[in-house]
Image (cartoon, helix red, strand yellow):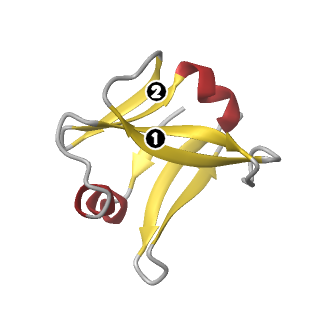
């Protein structure tokens, strides 16, 4: 599995979400949502100090984006592309095989 962020998404995480260098952003499944890869689960994210059980990590401009090992099931073999839509002021996820 890979995690890819667009330049727009990276800018949003830094400027609007307030992620600083050497911090982690963790993507994880949350129940009672919807996604194209899992029924009844959506993808969420938050800042964490340290990962508990590193699964997949990508570092961009000294910011680490990760999915914990126990959450990899959610992606069902898909890669994650994270983008940001200016018009809708929304972070979006694209799941690619």
- Category of crowding for the residue at label 2, using alpha-carbon neighbours closer than 10 angstroms: few (below 14), some (14–19), many (at least 20): some
Quadrant into which the C terminus falls: top right
Q: Is mark 1 in CB contact (under 8 Å) with mark 2?
A: yes
Residue placed farthest to the bottom in the image? 87
Q: Determine the image quadrant of residue 29.
A: top right
* Image height of 49 relative to 26, above or below: above
* Image height of 79 relative to 56, above or below: below
Give the mark nearer the N terminus: 1 vs 2.
1
Q: Nearer the viewer, residue 6 or 63?
A: 63
- Find residue 90 and report its horizontal and vertical position in percent: 48, 70
Q: Secondary structure at mark 1?
A: strand
Q: Which mark is residue 57?
A: none
- Find residue 42 and report its horizontal and vertical position in percent: 68, 49
- Category of crowding for the residue at label 1, using alpha-carbon neighbours closer than 10 angstroms: few (below 14), some (14–19), many (at least 20): some
- Find residue 53 and report its horizontal and vertical position in percent: 47, 15
Left or right position of 9 against 27: left
- Find residue 28 and report its horizontal and vertical position in percent: 56, 37
Mark pair 1, 2: CA separation: 8 Å
Q: Secondary structure at mark 2?
A: strand
Q: Nearer the viewer, residue 1 or 33?
A: 33
Q: Determine the image quadrant of residue 20.
A: top left
At x 68% / y 35%, what residue is drawn?
74
Left or right position of 82 against 94: left
At x 23% / y 62%, what residue is drawn?
15
Quadrant into which the N terminus falls: top right
Residue placed farthest to the right in the image? 39
At x 76% / y 49%, what residue is drawn?
32
Residue placed farthest to the top in the image? 53
**Residue hosting label 2:** 56
At x 19% / y 34%, what residue is drawn?
22
**Residue hosting label 1:** 3
């Amino acid at each position: 599995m890979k995690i890819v962020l667009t330049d727009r998404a990276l800018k949003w995480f830094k400027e609007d979400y307030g992620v600083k260098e050497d911090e982690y952003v963790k993507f994880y499944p949350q129940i009672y949502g919807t996604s194209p890869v899992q029924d009844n689960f959506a993808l969420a994210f938050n800042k964490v100090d340290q990962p508990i059980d590193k699964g997949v990590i990508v570092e961009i401009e000294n910011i680490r984006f990760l999915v914990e090992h126990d959450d990899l099931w959610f992606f069902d073999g898909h890669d994650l592309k994270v983008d940001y839509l200016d018009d809708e002021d929304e972070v979006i996820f694209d799941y690619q095989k």
